[in-house]
């Protein structure tokens, strides 16, 4: 239970919030016709069975309806905290944020409390590094401890005080579960079921097949997906737009790197040493790259030497260019023929990644670095019109960036031939090989025409690489592949200041609002565990007059892209997301990540917090640790915090200790580098046993691709 009640909580408030914002802020129509269709009075909100659906599609889709009541205050947040301090503790750690709003000025009770430590009565002194003895006790969290019998939905419902009185749940399908109704036949994307959905639900069916075999156009599967994404800007300034490297960019040089495998070529220290052609060098300069990151120093010569590679480097440290540049260099060197219109295209390179937004981002990088060359990059992904993908491909395709489901559809439709494939890249490779996508990847490499692993170059990149996934990867790679480990495999980016707060389910919303009010307008990603909760929290924040949008697998692709756009440009400085946005997304100026719900695995945590602190910039991550549901994460979390030289709350260490799992080899002995190339035997520092080799939680079966 609970979901319907969320709806009931949201709906009464929608009606009071939608109209005023809508008229004040968006009547210009700047954001498209959706606004004009948004109801402007509560009575309009009430009509028809699709009230919630209408609301979601028209206004909330981009977080616009619920911004601020007053025109001109759209992005301002009320900085007045209504909460008192919530606890005492010790130093929170202030590295790198002396000029931020976290440090100055705000003397609200919350902020003092937050800065000072943790809200738990059990909080003992925080420490950086070392495990030490376990202090404090674990009782008395005193913030509305959830009842064991309640599921999270119910807890959310019970905390409904902020929403005022609750109405009875709205009955009927139209008013019920938006997610479900929108996934169904009434939705634009109804005909396309994401690959991941089917794999996760264990149906054993091949969704790519069903689509390739007519699923998308089949009446029985719902209406066609008609969304055609707008083409990206073509002007040079937009193509080369980039953000600045941060103050810690040079510190990358101090990270230890280990290459394992035989006969690795030496690292290069400068772009010049890579001997790239002039056009590529020009593009690199226009992209603002002057210095190589460690993963680039090691990976570029390895790929140029024709070797297979598994590379693991921290989030935001330039892995995309590490594979794109040498692939492009090879293509240029080999004298690639210009793409031309053909019904069957035979690209030289396929790059796969787990989410639509990520493949799009990789495509934009490929387009940037191939600018002025005859190499043509194309992107295809689910949630968009299949015909559009085909039209993009037939115009010519050297580098194909694709999500697995759409890729297999297109191969099934014989628009892509694999005979010419020289490079196969798996970005977020551990995710691509896990239970969710692994079977599709296996199908890809056994497709007719796909060169064997001996005949192609296979490249895998990620910030996390569980040992069991590395073993699976061997099937894709030549036996003499090289393994590059930049720093701690699976480690968090050190430029992210991590804080873990004990927050019970009942208190999460209040705490979130307090934190966001103190953050001000800085861009913040809030991760939650389920799609429904994403909608719920986004709506709640909008009601609190915090401009918010959301991204998750139940939103139509158009809405997902709009949400990302609104977040990128700062129109909505808060993005509530499920794990669909955890990996790879590179968004300028994301200063904060908040784990409203902690993920189920530590690898997922590492990726989520890696949305901030990118490319040498600093960032902050705050995680709500719920004693009722997150204890299994305590031990790997302590390790990740320690390895990243973060303060470890004593209470967290205590939980980690009390939930000690024999055989867990993660030590808290500080920042010791170790390679975890599985070919070298059992590692001593990996987080094996806590990694994300399983697919995401089935309760949140996202349409990722
Ligand atoms: N050598 C460089 N100089 C300047 N900027 C760079 C350099 N390499 C990469 N960048 C920029 O750094 C940002 C992060 O790069 P990228 O997205 O490739 O990171 P990543 O390692 O793939 O991260 P994730 O693990 O989250 O996917 C991008 O904006 C990219 O353009």
Image (cartoon, helix red, strand yellow):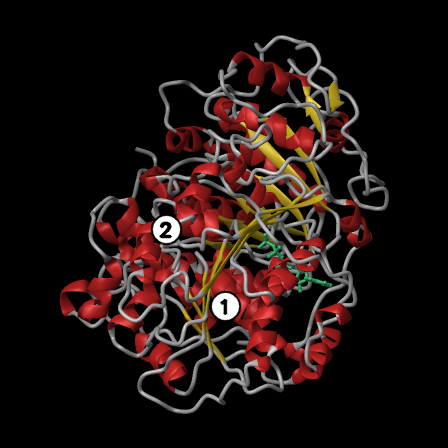
Instruction: Locate residue 252, reporting x and y percent.
Output: 76, 50
| Image quarter in which the N terminus is found | top left
User: Ligand 1 appears in which quadrant?
Assistant: bottom right
Measured Cα–Cα span from mark 2 to mark 1: 18 Å
Foreground of the two, 232 or 584: 584
Residue 260: give its label.
none
Instruction: Locate residue 705, reporting x and y percent.
Output: 38, 60
Disc 2 is placed on an element classified as loop
Foreground of the two, 45 or 233: 233
Mark 2 or mark 1, whichever is nearer to me:
1
Foreground of the two, 327 or 368: 327
Q: Is residue 433 above or below residue 651?
A: below
Q: Which residue is mark 1?
A: 360
Disc 1 is placed on an element classified as helix
Q: Residue sitting at 44 percent across and 48 percent down?
A: 431
Instruction: Locate residue 192, reporting x and y percent.
Output: 27, 63
Q: Is residue 167 left or right of residue 509?
A: left
Instruction: Locate residue 5, reporting x and y percent.
Output: 35, 38
Q: Which residue is mark 2?
A: 702
Sequence-wise, the earlier of marks 2 and 1 is 1
Q: Is residue 82 visible?
A: no
Q: Residue sitting at 54 percent across and 44 percent down?
A: 464
Q: Is residue 138 left or right of residue 495?
A: left
Label 1 crowding class (10 Å Cα cut-off): few <14, some 14-19, many 20+?
many
Q: Say whether mark 2 is within 8 Å of ligand 1.
A: no
Q: Is residue 476 left or right of residue 541?
A: left
Furthest-left residue in this view: 220
């Amino acid at each position: 239970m609970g979901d319907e009640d969320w709806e009931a909580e949201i709906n009464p408030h929608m009606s009071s919030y939608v109209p005023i914002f809508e008229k004040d802020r968006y009547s210009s129509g700047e954001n498209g016709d959706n606004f004009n269709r948004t109801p402007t009075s509560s009575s309009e909100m009430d009509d028809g069975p699709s009230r919630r659906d209408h609301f979601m599609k028209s206004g909330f889709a981009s977080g616009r309806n619920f911004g601020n009541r007053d025109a001109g205050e759209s992005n301002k947040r009320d900085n007045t905290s209504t909460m008192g301090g919530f606890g005492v503790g010790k130093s929170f750690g202030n590295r790198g944020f002396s000029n931020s709003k976290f440090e100055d000025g705000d003397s609200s009770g919350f902020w003092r409390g937050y800065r000072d430590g943790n809200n738990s009565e059990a909080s003992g002194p925080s420490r950086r590094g070392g495990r030490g003895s376990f202090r404090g006790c674990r009782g008395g969290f005193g913030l509305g401890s959830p009842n064991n019998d309640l599921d999270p939905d119910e807890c959310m419902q019970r905390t409904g005080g902020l929403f005022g009185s609750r109405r009875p749940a709205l009955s009927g399908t139209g008013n019920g579960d938006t997610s479900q109704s929108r996934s169904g036949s009434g939705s634009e994307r109804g005909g396309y079921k994401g690959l991941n959905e089917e794999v996760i639900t264990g149906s054993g069916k091949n969704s790519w097949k069903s689509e390739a075999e007519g699923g998308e156009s089949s009446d029985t599967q719902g209406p066609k997906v008609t969304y055609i994404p707008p083409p990206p800007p073509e002007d040079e300034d937009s193509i080369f737009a980039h953000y600045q490297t941060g103050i810690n960019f040079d510190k990358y040089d101090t990270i230890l790197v280990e290459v394992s495998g035989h006969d690795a070529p030496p690292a290069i220290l400068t772009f010049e040493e890579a001997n790239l052609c002039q056009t590529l060098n020009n593009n690199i300069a226009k992209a603002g790259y002057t210095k190589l990151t460690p993963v680039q120093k090691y990976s570029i010569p390895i790929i140029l030497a024709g070797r297979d590679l598994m590379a693991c480097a921290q989030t935001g440290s330039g892995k995309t260019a590490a594979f794109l540049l040498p692939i492009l260099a090879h293509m240029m060197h080999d004298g690639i023929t210009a793409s031309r219109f053909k019904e069957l295209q035979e690209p030289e390179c396929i790059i796969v990644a787990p989410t639509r937004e990520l493949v799009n981002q990789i495509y934009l990088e490929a387009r940037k670095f191939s600018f002025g060359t005859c190499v043509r990059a194309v992107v295809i992904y689910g949630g968009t019109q299949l015909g559009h993908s085909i039209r993009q491909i037939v115009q010519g395709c050297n580098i194909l960036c694709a999500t697995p489901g759409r890729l297999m559809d297109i191969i099934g439709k014989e628009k892509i031939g694999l005979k010419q494939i020289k490079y196969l890249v798996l970005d977020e490779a551990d995710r691509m090989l896990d239970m969710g996508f692994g079977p599709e990847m296996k199908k890809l490499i056994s497709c007719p025409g796909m060169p064997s692993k001996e005949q192609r170059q296979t490249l895998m990149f990620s910030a996390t690489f569980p040992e069991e996934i590395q073993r699976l990867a061997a099937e894709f790679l030549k036996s003499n592949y090289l393994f590059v480990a930049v720093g701690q495999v699976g480690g968090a980016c050190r430029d992210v200041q991590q804080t873990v707060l004990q927050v019970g389910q009942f208190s999460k919303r209040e705490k979130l609002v307090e934190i966001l009010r103190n953050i001000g307008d800085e861009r913040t990603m809030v991760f939650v565990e389920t799609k429904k909760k994403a909608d719920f929290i986004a709506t709640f924040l909008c009601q609190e007059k915090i401009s918010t949008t959301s991204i998750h697998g139940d939103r139509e692709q158009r809405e997902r892209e709009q949400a990302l756009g609104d977040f990128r440009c700062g129109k909505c400085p808060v993005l509530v997301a499920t794990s669909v946005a955890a990996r790879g997304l590179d968004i300028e100026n994301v200063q904060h990540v908040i784990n409203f719900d902690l993920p189920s695995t530590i690898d997922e945590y590492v990726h989520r917090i890696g949305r901030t602190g990118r490319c040498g910039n600093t960032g902050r991550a705050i995680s709500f640790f719920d004693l009722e549901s997150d204890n299994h994460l305590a031990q790997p979390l302590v390790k990740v915090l320690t390895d990243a030289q973060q303060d470890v709350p004593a209470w967290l260490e205590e939980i980690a200790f009390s939930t000690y799992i024999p055989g867990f080899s993660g030590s808290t002995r500080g920042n010791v580098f170790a390679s975890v190339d599985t070919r070298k035997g059992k590692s001593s520092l990996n987080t094996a046993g806590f990694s994300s080799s399983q697919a995401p939680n089935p309760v949140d079966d996202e349409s990722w691709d």
